[in-house]
Image (tube, grey):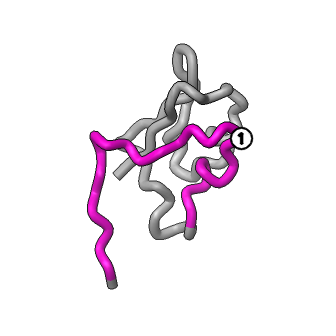
Amino acid sequence: MALLINSDCINCGMCEMECPNEAIAPGEDIFVIDPARCTECIGHFEESQCVKVCLSDCIFPDPAHREIRAHA
C-alpha cells in the first residue's frame, strides 16, 4: 500500500514535513513518495497525514502498490 503524488502538486512541501515515515522527498518537478516507505499512516493515524495537509489535493492511492485492508 502506498500513495502517489500527481502532476497537480504545487511543490509546497507540506506533505514532506508531515510524513511520519519520511517517505516523501522532492522530485525533479514535483514531490514523490517512496512506495517502500509509505504506509498511508495506517496504524498510527486515522487519516494519511500528507493527504490531510495537501494544499492542492494531489495525493491518491498508488494503483501499482495497492493492498486490501483487513476488516476487524
User: Is 49 above or below relative to 42?
Assistant: above
Q: Residue at x 60, y 48 (%)?
A: 50
Residue 18 rendering spot, x and y as whole percentages: 66, 48
Q: Quadrant of the C terminus?
A: bottom left
Q: Residue at x 53, y 42 (%)?
A: 59
Residue 60 rendering spot, x and y as whole percentages: 47, 45
* Depth check, front residue: 41 or 63: 63
User: Is 68 above or below relative to 13?
Assistant: below
Region rendered in magenta:
47-71
* Depth check, front residue: 4 or 24: 4
Which quadrant would residue 35 be assigned to in this image?
Answer: top left
SS category of the residue bearing label 1: loop
Q: Residue at x 41, y 47 (%)?
A: 61
Question: In this rendering, would 38 be left or right of 50?
Answer: left
Query: What residue is pinned by disc 1?
Result: 55
Direction top: furthest residue: 28
Q: Residues within 10 Å of mark 1 (few under 14, many from 20)?
A: some
Q: Main secondary structure of the magenta part?
A: loop
Tag 1: residue type? Leu
Magenta highlight on residue 38: no
How many numbered circles does the render carry?
1
Q: Residue at x 45, y 38 (%)?
A: 4
Question: In this rendering, would 62 be left or right of 57?
Answer: left
Which quadrant would residue 55 be assigned to in this image?
Answer: top right
Direction bottom: furthest residue: 72
Magenta highlight on residue 50: yes
